[in-house]
Amino acid sequence: MIAWLVAAGVALLPVALGDRAARRLAGAAWTHRCPRAALALWQAIGLGAGLGAVGLGLVAAVAPLAALFPHGAHTLARQIVSGHGLDGLGPVQLLALTWSAGLMSWLLIHTVRTAARTIRERRRQRLLVDVVADHSPAHDAYVLPVAEHVAYCVPGRHRRIVLSRGTLELLTPQELQAVLGHERAHARGHHDLALLPFAALTHAFPWLACARTARQAVAVLVEMIADDHASRAHGTLPLARALVRMAASASGPGPAAFALADAGVVERLQRLLSERRPPRWVPAAAYSTAGLLLSGPMAVLIAPLVCVTF
């Protein structure tokens, strides 16, 4: 019983801390100075909470079969393979097993749906860009014949960096190169893949405030990561000036696109113009915390496999 309670506590910890950790992390100032480490921590919170919720049901389901969770899961697997089905499980355990299977299926379905919707939207945007815009070899980008100030990236295998004629006329050459560097960083970094799980989580559980908080925070973080790439290559001031000039005209190019000034403009400007650098221990602590959040649920799910092996 003690072993079962320990395993259940390990699985439940990321779930219990999910909402509180999301609120704390969203308001933490250090995340803007270490966006990569903060992104890793957000991913660990989301994945750890999902694995923990699934693992909790598995722990509860195999409790009657053995004192230790790995042996109970091993016993259940052997029963199913030998044709004895779910013998030894009562109604509560069957309900827990159904919870885990249903939750895993629910998350998988919404992840696939979100990915398919995103792929369709990208294809539509690429088609529109190819029809309406002209390719500019000088900038390796597609130029829309409009006066509005537009700069965004349609990510994916066949990426499109999109500018408008108004953007070319508005920005200086240095600012334009900084903008292009920002958008190319989105494409090279596959930032759309970082956002996909959080979008799927929001669609799967639209009533969860922490899911919406995480999605908004991660969107700003990937913009900051792209800002870092652009500022290192082309300078901080040109990027900041371009961001200021284009912030007022960041009309939405679409949910599958990354626009230069679409998220956290004020925070990004403050960060670009600030000379404060975080201590080296801050990202190390963030990565360590991410590892700890994942270690418990992963151990609960992997333990039966280790038990079978040895």
Image: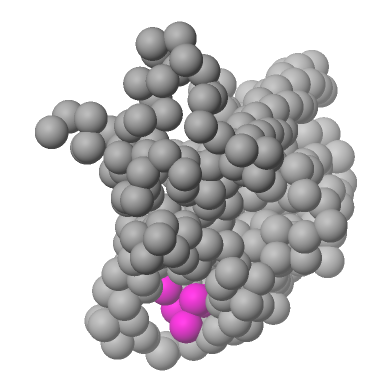
Residue interval drawn in magenta: 30-34
Residue in view at x 58 percent, y 63 percent: 15
Whole-percent x, y for residue 121 in the image: 76, 27
Identified at 64% across, 49% down, the residue is: 198
Asked if residue 29 is positioned above or below residue 296 in the image, the reply reads: below
Can the viewer see residue 148? Answer: yes
Lateral position of residue 171 relative to residue 229, left or right: right
Residue at the spot x=30%, y=40% of the render? 71
Q: Is residue 202 above or below residue 308?
A: below
Query: Is any part of residue 140 visible from this angle?
Result: no
Number of dots carrying numbers: 0
Question: Which quadrant of the rendered structure holds the N terminus?
Answer: bottom left
User: What secondary structure do most residues of the magenta stretch adopt?
Assistant: helix
Q: Is residue 291 above or below residue 279?
A: above
Query: Is 157 displayed left or right of 98 in the figure?
Result: left
Q: 144 or 266, which is in the foreground?
A: 266
Q: Quadrant of the C terminus?
A: top left
* The residue positioned farthest toward the left in the image shown: 310
The percent position of residue 282, horizontal first and vertical second, equals 33, 81
69 shown above or below 266:
above
Quadrant housing residue 125: top right
